[in-house]
Amino acid sequence: MNLKVGLPATLFDHRLLIVTGKGGVGKSTVAAAFGLLNARLGKKVLLVSLREDDSLAEIFGFRDLSYQPRSIEPNLWILNVIVEEALREYVVEKVKFEQVYKLFFENRVMQFFLEAAPGLDELLCVGKIHYMANLVSRKGGPKYDLVIVDAPATGHGVSLLKVARTAAQVARVGPIAAKAREIDAFLTDSNQTALVLVTLLEELPVTETIELLKVSTDDLQMKVAALIANKLFPLIRGIRAEEEYADLRRFMEKKRGKEVSEALFSVCDFARSWRGRQLEYLEQLRRKGGMTLSTLPFFMRDQDPVSSPRRVAEYIEGLSTGGEE
């Protein structure tokens, strides 16, 4: 595969990829693009949403996502981890009797204690992810070759990935502690699990991403397999010197008039200026990130939400002609 954006060649060899970063940087688009790309290449892929706003549902044209995996195209499934359903599934699996769940967990007193329990929601979510990533098919092999998680924004995402280790330390002994240690071992196994950090080339996202890189390795003890700078403005083709730019401006003014020329070049001026600032932040990430940096270009929005991840997938695979020069 021609990974011309600089993604590591072994990125998709993991069993679990967790896509995270600051809110609004394009995590859901990248996660969806990874899913589409790998499904097209023949892998069985599960996309997992942990977000209440269901960005993945919107991308694929659903009003909401189901807790049960839903097929969206060949080799690609999607689900949303719903805490209440995850709790029901865990309890019923352990006690083998759904009436016990209804008796103990669907009364108001128990609901109060469950809502007050710190970290329970996160533990159930990460437990479901671990379960799906290790699910075995009827033929004995993995049910899914790759599970891709559209994780919450940075702060909540870090809490989610720490919760299993914290639960193991608090519980110490018993089935919950044992399961929590199993989950934490899977998340920190660099051969099985990896983080993908997505950022925009702007001050706050870059600052937060640099901090997240340090937290990921030092605190979470997890492998960051890819660092992606999203929405890099394109180079204006054929204009490499200020003289050429000025000549083109005068030419357009002569041919189309001053008003049209000024409107057009105000957009061009903004794009050139913005790209210049982006390249400064790109260099900052390269200096402080300490790892290979991948870039994805800015794509104009389309009326069809799924077109954006499809274009990103094609760009990554090297099928389209667009890209950074």
Image: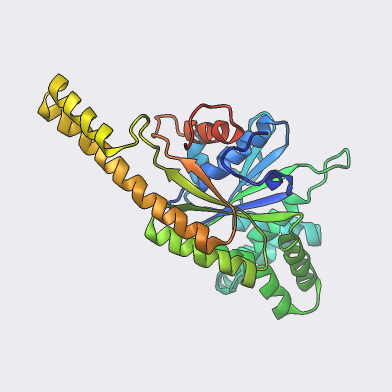
- Whether residue 304 appears in this view of the structure is yes
Q: Is residue 16 left or right of residue 107?
A: right
Compared with 250, 188 (above or below) is below
Compared with 39, 106 (above or below) is below
Across and down, in percent, residue 212 comes to 54, 65
Residue furthest out toward the left:
258
Find residue 289 and report its image quarter: bottom right
Across and down, in percent, residue 209 comes to 50, 61
Across and down, in percent, residue 49 comes to 58, 49
Residue for point 59% across, 53% down? 292
Q: Is residue 264 left or right of residue 121?
A: left
Which is more toward the observer, 270 or 149?
270
Residue for point 58% across, 74% down? 118
Residue for point 39% across, 37% down? 235
Q: Is residue 236 left or right of residue 127?
A: left
Quadrant containing the N terminus is top right
Which is more toward the observer, 199 or 139?
199
Find residue 38 and report its image quarter: top right
